Image: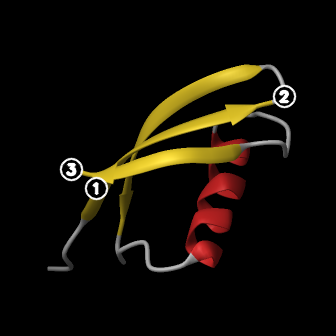
Amino acid sequence: MEKEHKYFVSYIYSEGWGNIDVTLTEPIQNIDDIRSMEQAIAENQELDESVCVQNFIAL
């Protein structure tokens, strides 16, 4: 069984702000991981591409 890495993520986008819980198979280690998360949030929440992660914390 793979270890799950759970995060609480707060973000902003062109029309406001939001937060979401995210479960990943690998821990967040660099800016590329955060950029990938921004893209995934935009797609999954049907937002424009202006999503910017403001903060995240491991749960």
Residue 4 vertical placement versus 54 (above, below): below
Residue at the spot 58% in from the left edge and 44% down from the top edge: 54
Residue 23 screen position, x and y as percent:
35, 56
Residue at the disc numbered 2: 14
Report how far apart the C-alphas of labels 3 and 2 lie in the structure. 27 Å
Along the line of sight, which residue is nearer the eye, 17 or 49? Answer: 17
Q: Quadrant of the N terminus?
A: bottom left
Query: Which numbered disc flags the more N-terminal residue, 1 or 3?
Result: 1
Report how far apart the C-alphas of labels 1 and 2 lie in the structure. 26 Å
Residue at the disc numbered 1: 6
Q: Amino acid at mark 3?
A: Leu
Count of numbered labels shown in the rendering: 3
Residue 46 vertical placement versus 9 (above, below): above
Q: Are marks 1 and 3 in contact (CB under 8 Å)?
A: yes
Q: Amino acid at mark 2?
A: Ser
Is label 2 in a helix, a strand or a loop? loop
Q: Is residue 56 left or right of residue 31?
A: left
Residue 30 screen position, x and y as percent:
53, 79
Residue 43 screen position, x and y as percent:
72, 46
Q: Amino acid at mark 1?
A: Lys
Q: State which quadrant residue 27 falls in.
A: bottom left
| Neighbours of disc 1 within 10 Å: few (<14), some (14-19), many (20+) | some
Residue 4 screen position, x and y as percent:
24, 67
Report how far apart the C-alphas of labels 1 and 3 lie in the structure. 5 Å
Query: Which numbered disc flags the more N-terminal residue, 3 or 2?
Result: 2
Q: State which quadrant residue 37 falls in.
A: bottom right
Residue at the spot 28% in from the left edge and 55% down from the top edge: 6
Residue at the spot 45% in from the left edge and 35% down from the top edge: 20
Q: Is residue 31 left or right of residue 2?
A: right
Residue 58 vertical placement versus 34 (above, below): above
Residue at the disc numbered 3: 59
Q: Residue furthest top?
A: 16
